[in-house]
Image: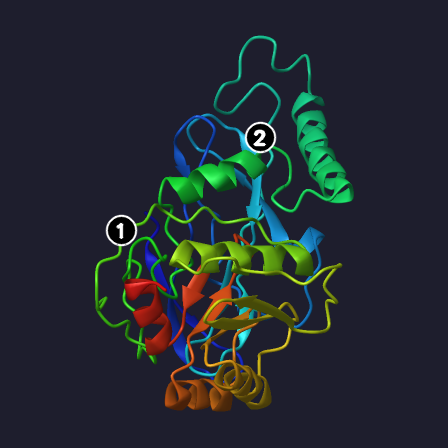
Amino acid sequence: MAEAVPVRCPACLRENGYTAPVFPCACGSPVHPPLDLSAPPVLLTHRTWSDSWVAVRCTTCGRESEWPHPELGCGSCGTVVRLPVHPLERPEPGTGPGAGPGAAADPAGAAGRAAGRRGDGLADARDGDPAGAPGDARAEVRGGAAAGAPGDGRTGGPGGGGPAAGPDVNPAHIPLPPTAAVPRPAFRPVTIRTARDAVATAALYLRWLGFQDVRQPDGRPIPSAAVDLRAPGLVAQVDPTTAPAGLRAVECVWLNGLTASATSVYFSLAGYTADARDRADELGIPLFVMDLTGMPQPVNDPADELVGSGA
């Protein structure tokens, strides 16, 4: 497992503990993006598909795969930052793990295979495959989630029920112990590349929590607008935008739940403002943050209680 490292938020200057996610290579060995700790984190204000992935080489078999670029949400102000990663070094022809007598004869082979994997990922995106990831990483992301791959260091995955390895310096949110043990299989995330993927992931997660008949709206979600999800006893809102959810958004989902006599839940891709988090704590609204791997993470006590007890 990668070691936890301190990351200073460029907005509020608070240090957050971060552990790089570990993914399973096709050969079975763990791989993780090599963080460049000498470079400052980059404030994430706009997402693009090409910048959301980083190439990582397995040190055991030399295989190259593309994985989600490391990101971190500040536990204090909710700012989302992208962590710099060391660029992939290209080995000389005929060297490196798995090189054989014929390796030098095909210098363009690795580049061609890598381009093929990227092409497969683009084809999947054009065909509307919401669970697709670039190339071979698509199946490996699912495999990593099923095997219990660690999260991004903010909180533990829903299957673990606790914080990830590595201390969080001055943590703003300490997960509560589960109020009741609810046996359920590990959640299988869906890689998020579009607003539709974010809505689908939130719906799958709510069903995993035990809510029945979760209904999604018809049509393609608008990237600049939040989307409602409904189920018996549930009103949820999914915010696929790149701006942190604010106070008004949290109060609106609370009012909708109050009108329907239902539980209110909020999912966001870019975190929450400080006012929104304070208000959600006062109203008892569970807040979740989703990263590109499609694994929702609880960010306040009501969310921890919902994960522990289920619907």
Reply above or below: 127 against 113: below
Q: Mark 2 or 1, which is nearer the eye?
A: 1
Q: Residues within 10 Å of mark 2 (few under 14, many from 20)?
A: few
Q: Position of residue 134 (x, y in %)?
A: 64, 40
Q: Residue furthest top?
A: 101
Q: Position of residue 208 (x, y in %)?
A: 42, 54
User: In the image, 43: left or right of 30?
Assistant: right
- Taking the spot 48% from the left edge, 23% from the top edge, the residue there is 97
Q: Amino acid at mark 2?
A: Pro
Reply above or below: 81 against 254: above
**Residue 161, image quadrant:** bottom left
Q: Is residue 295 visible?
A: no
- Taking the spot 59% from the left edge, 60% from the top edge, the residue there is 215
**Residue 29, image quadrant:** top left
Q: Nearer the viewer, residue 174 or 165?
A: 174
Look at mark 2 in the image and give the residue it sits on: 91
Q: Secondary structure at mark 2?
A: loop
Q: Nearer the viewer, residue 4 or 94?
A: 4
Query: In the rendered view of the protein, which quadrant contains the C terminus?
Result: bottom left
Q: Amino acid at mark 1?
A: Pro
The answer for how far apart the CA atoms under marks 2 and 1 are is 47 Å
- Taking the spot 32% from the left edge, 49% from the top edge, the residue there is 184
Look at mark 1 in the image and give the residue it sits on: 183
Q: Is residue 75 visible?
A: yes
Q: Secondary structure at mark 1?
A: loop
